[in-house]
Amino acid sequence: MSCMENRALREYFNSDPDDDWRYWTSPEYATYFISNQIAYTEDYVRIRNLFISGLSNKISSMELGKHFQQFGEVEDILMKPCGGRALVFFTKAEEACRALQKMYQFIEQIEIKVKPAYSWLQPDTDEACKREPDNATLKSLSNENSPPDDSNILPIALANEQINSIFSINVYCMVAIFRQLKPGAQMRLVRTNKRFLEVFKTYSCFEHKRFNLNQLNEMTLWEIRDLLQYAGKYMVEMRGSLPFKNRTTIMNFIRKCCPKLKKLQITNCGLKLTSFKNFIKSFSHLRTLDFTDGCLEDKHIQACQNVKNLDTLVLDGNVLITGAYIKDIVTIRVLKLYGCIRVETQNLIEISMALENLRTLDIRRIHGLDLSFYSVIDYQCQQLVDFKMTRSAYQYDRVALLPRLEHLEIIYPLPGEEIFVPLKLAIHKAQQLKTLKIYCKRSLTPEHIDSISQLKQLRSLSIAFNFRVINDAALKKLCRLTQLEELIIVRSYDITNDALLKLLKSCPKLSVLNIQFCEKISMEFVLRSIEILKARRVHSKQPLVVYTCYTAIKESDLNECAKYKEAERSGLLKIDTSYSDELEDVYSSIRYPFDGVRINGKFFPYTDNDE
């Protein structure tokens, strides 16, 4: 008991009593192993202390001790009053191992659960952290050509000198070492020497400000705890997915150790409401909160009201929320609800009324919205700059009347749908709109291309999947968009090298061109485009990046072309022949909802080339 800090014990007892218990019981997520009748934690620390949960208030420490004495001598027991939890301290590791092998046990017909205490709560932790190299290790560090006489003295002295020289290297070398190590290895190195710890804290000031949570999957819980304790106070941004194992405990570590977080992006968090509330209330500086695919409900959103300066809220894929309580977070300027299929129209109207500074709104794949929202959008969302939506069954062309609209994206799930927005945009936003992305299939017409070509300030345009209308004539019209920087015309099967080269000449700022599945584009385009890019170097310093998967441009031809290799080295042109799945999710959403059509009793299956 004397080897444990009271603060650590209080921290342990304040955690969730059944934190991710299902993962403790799964062999896939085993946190200890047994060797020679001794159990070790995942950090290779001998287990002598066990954690007991599921206790009834009727069970006293004396009864608990009597129960565990059947496995060996119990040194001490620490119980949390009215908490249903306890720590049992065994004298010998072999005895603790015997008790640990029975995960579910009974005391007076009450089932209790037994698992090892954390690595840092074991008595032998200090020994594990401060291991001295044995003679065999020291000998391996010594000079192999040392004289045979006094071989047990001289080599050890040489080895000790080498070890001391490691600890005396300068700070810059130690920082370079930390940069080469993964976070788990960094923690193991830090435990060996206090100087390493001090250098690591300095290193964390700038290297761990933005942390990728996916790295935690390769770390033990002890390593995660130490990392957050030493570096957490410097972290301002976290992103990624948390490990399933010990998820609630890790969230508690983040909550306690990372008070300066401003941006938090966690996918698949899946936290219970109580744990979520405790977690979210700890971040007073938080400005961006992203819980994509988090299985959140409206009550989780209600808990976010405690974040006073929240600027961005991303709830993509949380299919259970209805949009209630979002209106109460009045500081939100960016709101993303992609795929939140249960969002109700009335809640969205209240959101647009309450969030006066809303600048970005994403409601793609929300199909249940009715006319009452779209009829008021232009005067309730006065500050809206970026709007993304899925086509409504009701009249929605008032979107083009949004006063500050600069970026618009619309998905049309069904092929052949009638589209009005480009015509309205040409009338009201010809000198304002900068981004237009229309994802539809066989819906655009030559009249739509005429309207789009009138948007003189357009920087980014995506009109993929409309191969019947995106042809050489359409590209000739798009040559009017002289400010264009990005163009996506995937699956435009009929466009040719000549038309694409004319577009490249007319749009000197073009830096991204996605022409995947444009089968007629060949190496001729690559070679002729280099001359155009050399001439326009004055207008744009950025290279032209072209995505050419499933065109006639082959990677083998590029590798053999000296002219292209020179253009790539000089930063003129970059051809990417790999498949980019950026639009895959959109393309899957606009496929035919049926496999084909039945006419006069005969079934005709749809293909990509069908009208």
Image: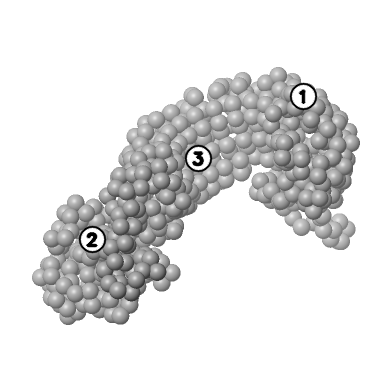
Q: Amino acid at mark 1?
A: Thr
Q: Residue furthest left?
A: 62
Residues at circles 2 and 3 in contact by the CB criterion of under 8 Å:
no
Q: Quadrant of residue 601?
A: bottom right
Q: Quadrant of residue 30?
A: bottom left
Q: CA distance from mark 1 to mark 2?
A: 68 Å
Residues at circles 1 and 2 in contact by the CB criterion of under 8 Å:
no
Write the residue at 31% across / 62% down: 158
Q: CA distance from mark 2 to mark 3?
A: 43 Å
Label 2: which residue?
Answer: 126
Residue 80, percent from left and from top: 17, 59
Residue 587 vertical position relative to residue 334 in the rendered view, above or below: below
Write the residue at 76% across / 38% down: 567
Residue 209 vertical position relative to residue 36 in the rendered view, above or below: above
Q: Which label lies toward us, 1 or 2?
A: 2
Q: Amino acid at mark 3?
A: Val
Question: Does 154 sit left or right of 346 as displayed?
Answer: left
Q: Residue 455, can we see it?
A: no
Q: Which mark is residue 482?
A: 1
Structural crowding at the residue carrying mark 3, measured as other residues with C-alpha within 10 Å and reported as few (<14), some (14–19) or many (≥20): many
Q: Secondary structure at mark 3?
A: strand
Q: Secondary structure at mark 2?
A: helix
Q: How many marks?
A: 3
